[in-house]
Amino acid sequence: MMDTSFTQNRELSWLKFNERVLDEADDKNVKLLERLKFFSIFDSNLEEFFMVRVGSLTDLSQLKKKAVDNKSGMSPNQQLEVIMEKCGPLFEKKDRVFNELVEDFKKEGFFIKKVSDLDLKERSYLNYYFDSKIEPLLSFQVVDTVRPFPRLPNLSLSVIFKLKKENKKNPKKNKFILGLIFVPEKISRYIKISDRAIVLLEDVIKEFGEKVFDQYECEAKYVMTLTRNTDIKYNDEDFEVEKDFRSYMSKMLKKRKRLQPVKLEVDGSLDDELKEVLVEKLSLREENIFVTKSPQRAGFVFDLIDELPTDMKDKFLDEKFEPQKSFMIDDHKKMIEQIEEKDLLLSYPYESMDPLIDLLNEASVDESVVSIKITLYRIAKDSKVAQALIKAAENGKEVFVLMELRARFDEDNNIVWSSRLEDAGCKIVYGFDNYKCHSKVLLITRVKDEKISYISQVATGNYNEKTAKLYTDFSLMTANEEIGVDAKELFDNIMIGNLEGDYNHLLVSPKSMQDGLNKLLDEQIERQKTHKDGYIRLKMNSISDRKIIDKLSLASSAGVKIDMMVRGITCILPQVKDKTENINIYQVVGRFLEHHRVYQFGRGSESKLYISSADFMTRNIRNRMEVALPIYDKDIKLRIMKFLDIMFADDVKIRKLNSDGSYSKVENKTNSNSQEILIDNAIKRAKAKEEEKRSHAISKNIKTDLETKRPKKKKEDGEVSFLEKILLLFRRK
C-alpha cells in the first residue's frame, strides 16, 4: 500500500505554485506594471493547466480502468472534483487582485474603465466607435432550430445574449433564444478613450452589441471564454497510414481544436435556465463553469504595456535589462579555439546566448568541421540556431537534427522549421516511438591533421533566443574528448532508435539516468553512515516521480541533509517526522522564470555536480530522452555552486514549503533578491571585462606609439653599419 504521509497530489501542488504567481501581482513591493504582468501570467498559466492537466484527467476519468494517483491515492474523478473546489476561491482572488490593480492605477492617473463608469461624452464616443469600427467586423448569430449552436474554438472569447421575442399568436411559445457575438481576434482588446484611459473591447461589445439583435428583447448578457482539452494522445501505430510523421502531426493538431470543453468562464452568475442550456450545448459539467469579473484571456496586457506613455513605463517597470556579454568569452578569438582551451559556461538570461550562435555560425564555415548534430525541442519563430544549421548544410557540412514535433504548443513552429531544414539538406529525424526527446545536446565533429575531435554543448534549456532572455538556464560548451565520445554515442543511438545506450559520463534517460541517480543518492547515504556529512542540493522545476521521492525519503531518514529548490510541482512534503525531516524545500518566483536543473551530491570541491534537462518527474526520468552532464572544470563547478548559494540565500522572493503543502515567507535578514544580485554580478563582470579590454588596447597603443616615436640614432659621418661591416669582410676574403 502506498504511503501518502509525505506526498501530495501534483495538480494541487501546481495550483499552489500558480497562486504564488498571483501573489506577485498582489505584492505592493513589486512595481505596478510588473504586477499587471504577473496577473496576465497567472491567467495564461491557468488556461494551460485546464487545457493539459484537466484535459488529461478528463480523458483518464472516462477509461474503464481508473488509474490512482500514487502520491495522494485519488482517482481521476476525485482529483477533478478537488481541482474545481480549489479553483473557485482562486478566481475570487484573481478578481480581488485585479480590482486592487485598477485602484492603484487610478491613483497614478491611469484608468481601466467599465462602460458603466463613463461619462456621457465618453459613452457617446464609444457608441459611435462601435457602429463605425467594430460592428462591421463582427460575426454573430442567433441560435434556433435552423441555426444550431456553433462549435466554439478553444480559448474563444465571445459575448452571449439571452434574447426573447414576443409571440403574439402563441404566447406559450415565448421561449428565450441565444445570441452570440464572437469577439474579433484582429482588433485590439482595448480601446483608448484618452492617453490614460482604456475600455476593454469585450465590454464595449457587451454594452452595445445587442443592437445587432434589434428584433429581440435582451434579458441578460455575459462575456465568456471556452477552454477545450488539448491533451492529444499520439498513437504511434497510426503513423504508418500517413505519408510521414510530419503529416500525422499536422492531422493531430487539427483534431486538437475539436476536443472536449473543460472550462467555461463567464463574467457574472448565470440564471438556471441559461446555465442548463450552456451545459447541454457545450457538453460541460456545471462545476466546470467559473464566474470571473476580471479580464479573461489577459495576454493582451503585454501589448497594452508596450503602448503606455513612456513616463509610466519608466516609473512602473523594472529597469530594462539586456543579457550581458559573458566574462568567459574573448570577442577577438574564435569560439572553437576558446572551447579547446577551456570549458565555457553561459548563464541565461544574465549572459547572452550569442556565443552559442557564434559557435554554430563559425562551425558552418570552418573547413575542419565535418558534421553538426543537435536535438531541438522548442526554438524561436525566427530561429538564428536553425538559420545557422541551414547555412552549414548549404556549405556542405553534414547536419543532423532531431526535431521533436511533439513539443506541446510548439508543434506548428517545429513542423515549419523541420521542413525548411530538410529542404536545405539537413538530415531530419523526429525522435522515438512513444518517447519524446527533451534533451538539449549539440555535437560538432572536426577532422584536423587526420585527428578527430569534438566540441560538445549541453544545456538545461532550449535553443531558443527568445526564452533565453526570460528563463534562467545554464549552457556548457566543452572540448572534453570523453564527453564528446559519449555525445557521439548518443547521436548514434538516436539514429538506430536505441534508448538503452551505455555512457561513461552522461546520464541519459530512460535507462542510465535512473541508475545513475540511484548510485549518486546511495553514495550520500553511505557517506552519512561513515562521515556523518551526507549532503544533496537540487534545483529544478518539478518533482513528482514516486521512486525518486521514496529514495530521497530514504536518504533523509538516514540523516542526509537535503536542500531543494523546486519552482513548480512539488509532490514531496518536507519536515515530516521519520520520512523527510532532513529535507528543506524552497521556491523562487521572480522577474525571470527559474528553469535550471542542477544536481549536487556532496559538499565542496569533492562534490559531484550535474546540469540537466530533466526534472524529477516520471515523464522525464522514464518516458523521455533526457541528458545530465557532469561538471569537471573546477572553476565552473565553483561558479555553479556559488550561484546555488546565492539562490538559497534569497530572503525576498523565496518561499519555504511547509509539511502541510503551504508556503511561507522566510525571515528577511539581508534583503537578498537572488535574481537582482545575479543581474548586478553579470553587469559588473561585463564592465570589468570591457575595462580589461580597454586597458589592454590602451597599453598596446602606447607601446606602438613609443616604438614609432622613439628617435632613431643618427649615423655619424664615416660610421659603418653592422651589415656593411659584414659585407666588407666577405669582399676582403
Image (spheres, grey):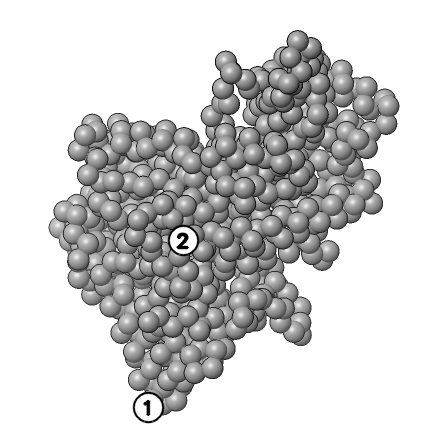
- At a point 43% along the width and 83% down the height, the residue shown is 578
Vertical placement of 676 versus 63: above or below? below
Residue sitting farthest toward the top? 169
Looking at the image, residue 23 sits to the left or right of residue 70; the answer is: right
Q: Where residue 266 appears, x then y in whole percent?
A: 62, 37
Local secondary structure at mark 2: helix
- Residue 339: percent from the left, percent from the top? 33, 56
Amino acid type, residue under disc 2 in the picture: Pro
Residue beneath the point at 39% across and 76% down: 553
Residue, x 50% and y 41% (percent of image)? 285
Q: State left or right for residue 105 relative to residue 635.
A: right
Instruction: Give above or below for 512 relative to 439.
Output: below
Judge by depth and name the residue closer to the eye, 298 or 592: 298
Mark sitting earlier along the chain (1/2): 2
Q: Is residue 93 visible?
A: yes
Quadrant of the drawing holding the C terminus: bottom left
Q: Is residue 319 placed above or below 527 in the rendered structure?
A: above
